[in-house]
Amino acid sequence: MSIVLVGSTSGSVTLQEPAVAGTTVLDLPAVSGTVITTGSSGGVSQSMLATGVAGTGPAFSAYQSSAQTLPTNINTKIFFQTEEYDTANAFDATTNYRFTPQVAGYYQVSGGFSIGATACGIRLQIVKNGSSYKTTFNALSTTVNAAFGSALVYLNGSTDYVELFGFVGVGQVLQAAIETTYFQASLVRAG
C-alpha cells in the first residue's frame, strides 16, 4: 500500500490511500500548529490537549510539619508548611496555605488532620474563595481523633482557591506529619 500526497500549500493537504474496497481520505486543514504523535519529542503542554483532558495539569501535596493548635469550637484554617510536590507552583505553603491553580477545571481535593491528646467531636471542611464549600467529615456528636475527606471542586484557573479548615470540640495540637495532617489536589478534567 502507498500513500499519495495530493493538494497544494494553499488550502488543505489530503493524504489518500489507493482504493481497495473503497476510499479512505484524511483531510488536514491548512492551519499552523503542532501535530502530536507517539514519535514526538519534548513535552505535551496543557494547551496542546483537547478541552476536557487533564494531561499534565496542576497537582500538589502538602503536609503540616510544624504543629498547630486548633482552639475549642472555632472553625480554623489548617496550616500546611511543607510541600511534598507542587507541579505548577500553585500552592502557597508560607503565607495563605491555599491552592490557586492557573488551569480551569475540575480538581479532586482531599486532606485530613489528626489529633493526639483527647478524642472529641471533629469537622473537616473544604473552603473555596473564603466560604465553606464542602463538609467532608462531620463527627461533632461523637468522639474521634481524626478527620479525612475529599470532594470534586471546580476552579476557574485564575482567582479561585481552596483551603482546609478544621474544628475540634476540645482545643488541642494537631499531629504534624506527612501521613496524618495533609492537603492535596489534582486536576482531573480541564475545562
Image: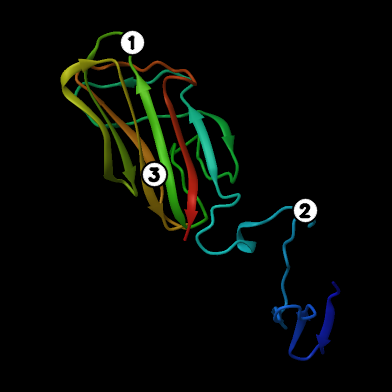
Q: Which mark is residue 21?
A: none
Which badge, 3 or 1, is on the more N-terminal residue?
1
Of label 2 and label 3, which has the lower sequence position?
A: 2
Tell me residue 182's x, y (percent): 44, 27
Instruction: Count residues near mark 2 (Cα–Cα under 10 Å), then give few for <14, some for 14-19, many for 20+.
Output: few
Q: Mark 3 points at which residue?
A: 162
Callout 1, which amino acid?
A: Gly
Residue under label 2: 42
Q: Tell me which residue sits at (24%, 12%) in the image.
A: 119
In-image side of 32 versus 169 (left or right) = right
Please name the amino acid that badge 3 sits on.
Val
Dot 1: what SS? Answer: loop
Q: Which of 28 and 127 is in front in this view?
A: 28
| Residue tagged 1 | 116
Q: Which one is closest to the eye, mark 2 or mark 3? A: 2
Task: Kindly identify the residue that appears in the image at 41 percent across and 29 percent down.
Answer: 79
Q: Residue furthest left?
A: 141
Q: How is the image coloured?
A: rainbow
Q: Which of 78 and 125 is in front in this view?
A: 125
Describe residue 85's horizontal placement relative to residue 150 as left or right.
right
